[in-house]
Amino acid sequence: MVYLYIEKNTIKLISLKKTLIGQQETSFSEKSYEADLLKDGKVINIDLLASAVKEVVTSNPTIDNQVFLILPQEAFLFIRAEVPSDIAPSALTSFIKDKARASFPVDPDLCLTAPFVQEANEQKVVSFFGLSKDVFNDYQQAFSLIDLKITSVIPDSLAYFKLFEKTLRKEKRETILYGSYEKSQLSGYVFDTFGLLQEKKLILEVKKEEKLEEILKEETENMAENKIKLNRIILSGEASEKIRQDTFTKAVGVWTNPLKRIIPNFYNEYLKILVVDGKKPFPLLAFDVCFGAFIFHQENHDFSLLKEGVKISSKKSLSLPRITLPKKPVLLFLGSFLLSFLIFIVISNLRINLKLPSIKRPEPTTIPTQTPTPTPSFKKEDLKIKILNGSGTVGKAADVKNILKDKGYGEIITGNANNYNYEKTEVQIKKQFTQISSTLKIDLKDYLSSFKESILDATATADLILIIGKDFK
């Protein structure tokens, strides 16, 4: 999986390839461009973006074509609302969409949307994100030009929030500034316990003769005047490496947490599985947004702007030419057809009324025959297969992928199911490929006695989805 972040004129990327022992072989790259790639989160030029992404991607030796895309918050439409405690989960979507219709400049039905729900102190708050299908279509076209596929997309604000979410105390409502300090600029967002509080990105310029702590102190005072009291500042970015927590906290007047101290204490299990070539440490402070997206991908399977089978309409529509037929030949054809049909009916009735003598014939001895198994009209190596781990066993999807590869199956991608509580393995197959079911049972007989089978939506990208259950040996 590739976690790729695009902002105004910079692209950051980490590429992860799972090893047999469950770790992630990690490579990374970053590049800034003189020309802007995005404006207000929208693609300026599709070809230019494709060329820039290709340059960053090809600098990595082992790259996957599956992309987890991270975009600036400004690319998304956003509202936040408190949810009544008694609302049913099934009614949540319609509740928040009604609010979005009143706030979004476009109909939410013309957007890719997803809610992010947080609960604390008997309160439930939903952050609702929308990405215009037209905006996403431009990204999709750029990536398709270089044979990359966008499998997920989230705003950078959610990636940053995941980096400190576990430090939040649910019984205490905090207001937090997360800032990335790079060279002469600090940029970030204001959050609270429930997620993003202000959607506009905060950007503070730091000149040579100025100190960051003095600028932040002034900014916190301005926020206080607007009734936003900061409880914490979390600093990331390579320039934050030299900041001392104690003196910085004292100078700003707000408790400051360096990200480099948060991660080892709360997210070390994720950091440990990233294996960088040459045993170098992973440059967390430079690629924090990509690392946050990686954590989000592992922990928030229910959040998805890209539902299975989503189709993005192309800007150019193709239409078939209209064919006009001459009326006279058509009428002659219809008349002859009706006449033939009437003659057929008359002859059939005459045959029924004629009584012929019945002749008793000896009943033939029936010999049971075995119905041959139909030979599939396709090869199993041509199938597009998706394996999802629903068993909770780390690395199980990769193991099953190796099993099917040994059996001659072709294109296979892996991932996690929406939960790890699948007791029985499930197989979803498109209708035209259901003949492969019997072959699959034979190929997996050493690992599985049976599996639950269902029809897969024809619009799905995969031809067959295998969800591994706890019954898989």
Image (cartoon, helix red, strand yellow):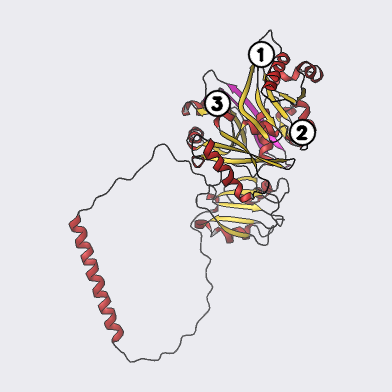
Q: Quadrant of residue 290?
A: top right
Which of these two is toward me, 417 or 111?
111
The image shows residue 1, relative to residue 470, as above or below, that is above
The alpha-carbon separation of the residues under discs 3 and 1 comes to 30 Å
Circle 2 crowding by C-alpha within 10 Å: few under 14, some 14–19, many from 20: few
Residue 51 marker:
none
The alpha-carbon separation of the residues under discs 3 and 2 comes to 37 Å
The image shows residue 227, relative to residue 305, as above or below, that is above
> For the image shown, how many numbered marks are present on the structure?
3
Write the start and end of the magenta stretch as one range. Answer: 9-38
Which of these two is toward me, 317 or 102?
102
The numbered mark, 2 or 1, whose residue comes first in the sequence reads 2
> Circle 1 is placed at which residue position?
206
- Give amino acid for label 2: Thr
Q: Of helix, strand and loop, which mostly describes the magenta segment?
A: strand
Question: Mark 3 against mark 1, which lies toward the viewer?
Answer: 1
Q: Position of residue 218 (x, y in %)?
A: 70, 16
Q: Secondary structure at mark 1?
A: loop
Give the farthest residue toward the top.
209
In this picture, residue 407 sits left or right of residue 309:
right
Does the magenta segment cover residue 21?
yes
Q: Residue at x 53, y 60 (%)?
A: 435
The alpha-carbon separation of the residues under discs 2 and 1 comes to 28 Å
The numbered mark, 3 or 2, whose residue comes first in the sequence reads 3
Can I make out residue 26 in this image?
A: no
Give the farthest residue toward the left.
328
